[in-house]
Image (cartoon, grey):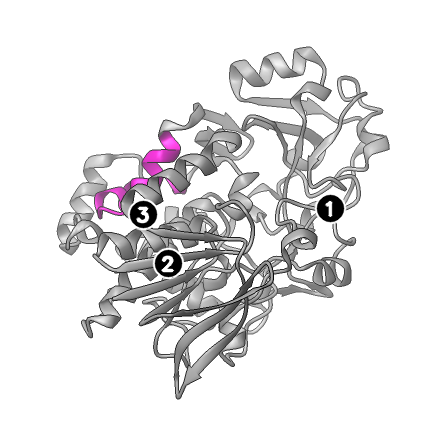
Amino acid sequence: MKVIVIGGGWSGSAAALAARNQGAEVVLIERTDMLLGTGLVGGIMRNNGRFTAAEEMIAMGGGELFELADRNSLHRGIEFPGHRHSNLYSVARMEPMVRSFLLSKGVSINCQVRVTDVEMAEDSIRAVLARQNNESLRYAGDVFIDATGTAGGPANCSKYGNGCAMCVLRCHSFGGRVSVTAKAGVKEMIGRKGDQIGAMSGSCKLLKESLDPQIVATLDEKGVAVVPLPSSKVLKGKLGLKCCQQYAIPEFEQNIILLDTGHAKLMTPFFPLDLLRAIPGFENARYEDPYAGGLGNSIRYVGMAPRDDALRVEGVANLFCGGEKAGLLVGHTEAICTGTLAGYNAVKSVRREKLLVLPDTLAVGDAIRFVRKQMREEGLLSLKYTFSGSVYFERMKAKGLYTLDLKQIEARLDATGLAGVFAER
């Protein structure tokens, strides 16, 4: 069995790991020189309902990446506005840890490989065509997983945002995102909110060294720093642009909220540099990512795959999807969950076995099904869904799915018969 995973973000890494754990030969293709994608500047795990989702995955045998992130945590169990029991991982150390772990498992990682096209045979993909430097490459496989995400390239960020903000996706150096789903002839779904196409990434990264020593000391000790903004510095309406709706609450508009992920994670899509430097403690502030964080940020959710609840892409027999490609799911936890299921089901499809659909008695299964249904409804492509807040977290709580009780999660898994399912060979 040969599985080709395109896109090495959290979702693609999880898909490659899950397929490899099922005994497949796995080739992971990534267009840049590093894995994790937006996870290179993310850093938040286990906040709110993400704790429940992570523990469900661990109980199902699909939690190795969560355990890696736990070991790499700079801060555990912190609270910031609207969010409880959060872990913050080091964005500097995470990617090498994940890469080494995947290699130790036998995943073949191919970086700086950019997809150019696909070869089709009726309703199936026969091979993915790509380029590395000036060399043409062909990756044939039995099944393919599209984990290319929905962000960029620069033309989309300019057309639907405030221009290319030169973010960690580094499209100018490695080429923009190429969707395997679209290349296979599938019409993708586009998120929109009124006149806004897609959504803007919701945070920036400041060099800690550029901040006042007292702010840095607070970050080092507590993991979070909340600095009230003078009313004249509050930028109204900016939070409506965010893809991360769980942070679109008044506290994030009225304060500068920083999280320590190795750098200082600024929880806003952008903040004009001259205004930022007028705030005490930020006189020397400098953006680390995106470099033009005073102007804008990357645009995401402009190319999602129509799919079923087993994460198979509609219209292509041997194509699965995970992460943002699987729909309006926001976050690293969500990407790992969908990537793991996509990788597992990719192997099941090659074996011609029944695909796994997670039940709605589990938060992960309910989220995958709920988001798929919501995306079919008129006007709901403007919403985003996450275990950590907003629409879906409220649903989790209403359904009694949100819990910190590990014994309760274990009992749920026992009732479904899915304990350890992703670890079975």
Image coordinates of residue 415 in percent, x first then y, are 14, 52
- Residue at the image point whose x is 18% and y is 42% from the top: 410
Numbered label attached to residue 401: 3
Please tell me whether mark 3 sits on a helix, a strand or a loop.
Answer: loop
Q: Nearer the viewer, mark 1 or mark 3?
A: 1
On the picture, is 283 further left or further right than 57? right
What is the three-letter code of the residue carrying label 1? Lys
Q: Quadrant of the N terminus?
A: bottom left
Please tell me whether mark 2 sits on a helix, a strand or a loop.
Answer: strand
What is the three-letter code of the residue carrying label 3? Leu
Sort mark 3 into few (<14), some (14-19) or many (20+) by Cα contacts within 10 Å. Answer: many
Distance from the alpha carbon under mark 2 to that under mark 1: 40 Å
Instruction: Give whichever of discs 2 and 1 has the lower sequence position.
Output: 2
Magenta region, residue range: 49-70
Image coordinates of residue 280 in percent, x first then y, are 79, 18
- Residue at the image point whose x is 59% and y is 41% from the top: 247
Sort mark 1 into few (<14), some (14-19) or many (20+) by Cα contacts within 10 Å. Answer: some
Q: According to the image, label 2 marks what residue?
A: 27
Q: Nearer the viewer, mark 2 or mark 1?
A: 2
Image coordinates of residue 389 in percent, x first then y, are 49, 45
Above or below: residue 272 compared with residue 7: above
